[in-house]
Image (spheres, rainbow, N blue to C red):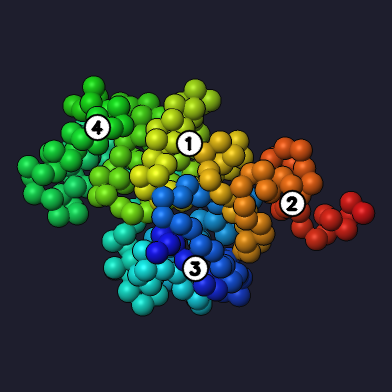
């Protein structure tokens, strides 16, 4: 069974098609990156796959469960670390983790144990009693991911996890994210091309709502006849008007 299978997945907003007939398969344990310029349809795709937005047409299966026919069952297989860090700023690190564990049904003792395990895994134990608002941006992102993973999802969606971080903090978070490979299916959206190239097993490039290209970074470079991934991305997301102007 694949982790994610989309068939004709489409979302329209008042005559504008944000995601157009998306057909995509992501294997269990795969680290998949979804790239595209602003407005390409990445966030809308993630919102549909996490059952925050109903599709206009088509369907997707998460671990075999349909987001269109059985959204609650599909949603139970995934969790999301959103672009806007979803942590309670006035709660401590431990309290944030325990809150999520309790919301997903753990009793107090089990939630405490899950929080301790999550803090060890993500290097947060030394800050357990600190309020979240005192953490650096990188540590807050790490906490956000730990909160998404405390429920043991089969699929983890990371929406722009390193947005706004400095280079050092971004690289540190890369190490944390990279350690998830093979443990959980990860779907990453990012504007940092080097991030996708460094972390992802495969990369999908969306453009104007459609899946424009799919493959490893090397395969996408070969497809675009480019010597580096940045040039490949630019070539694969060129509009028809830009292509005609270049000829």
Residue 98: x %, y % from top left: 17, 42
Mark toward the start of the polypeptide (3 vs 1): 3
Name the residue at 57% across, 67% down: 22
* Residue 89 visible at all: yes
The residue indicated by pointer 2 is 223
Q: Is residue 58 above or below residue 172?
A: below
Image spot of residue 209 (x, y percent)? 62, 63
Query: In screen coordinates, is 106 left or right of 2?
Result: left
Q: Is residue 218 left or right of residue 4?
A: right
| Front of the two marks 4 and 1 | 4
Q: Are marks 3 and 4 in contact (CB under 8 Å)?
A: no
Task: Say the numbered circle drawn on residue 6.
Answer: 3
Indicate the position of residue 155 as horizontal and vertical percent values: 37, 54
For label 4, the residue is 119
Say which of 130 and 192 sits in front: 192
* Disc 2 + disc 3, Cβ < 8 Å: no
């Amino acid at each position: 069974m694949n982790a994610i299978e989309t068939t004709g997945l489409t979302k329209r907003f008042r005559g504008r098609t944000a995601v157009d007939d998306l057909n995509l398969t992501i294997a269990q344990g795969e680290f998949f990156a979804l790239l595209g310029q602003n407005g390409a349809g990445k966030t809308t795709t993630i919102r549909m796959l996490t059952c925050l937005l109903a599709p206009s047409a088509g369907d997707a299966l998460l671990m075999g469960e349909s987001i269109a026919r059985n959204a609650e069952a599909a949603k139970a297989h995934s969790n999301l670390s959103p672009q806007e860090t979803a942590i309670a700023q006035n709660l401590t690190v431990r309290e944030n983790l325990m809150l999520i564990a309790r919301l997903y049904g753990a009793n107090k003792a089990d939630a405490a144990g899950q929080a301790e395990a999550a803090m060890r895994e993500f290097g947060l134990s030394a800050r357990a009693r600190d309020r979240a608002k005192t953490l650096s941006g990188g540590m807050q992102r790490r906490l956000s991911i730990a909160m998404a993973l405390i429920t043991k999802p089969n699929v983890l969606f990371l929406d722009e996890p390193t947005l706004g971080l400095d280079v050092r903090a971004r690289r540190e978070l890369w190490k944390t994210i990279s350690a998830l490979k093979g443990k959980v299916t990860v779907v990453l959206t990012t504007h940092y091309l080097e991030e996708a190239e460094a972390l992802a097993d495969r990369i999908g490039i969306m453009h104007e709502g459609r899946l424009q290209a799919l493959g490893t970074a090397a395969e996408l470079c070969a497809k675009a006849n480019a010597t580096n991934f940045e040039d490949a991305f630019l070539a694969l997301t060129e509009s028809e008007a830009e292509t005609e102007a270049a000829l």
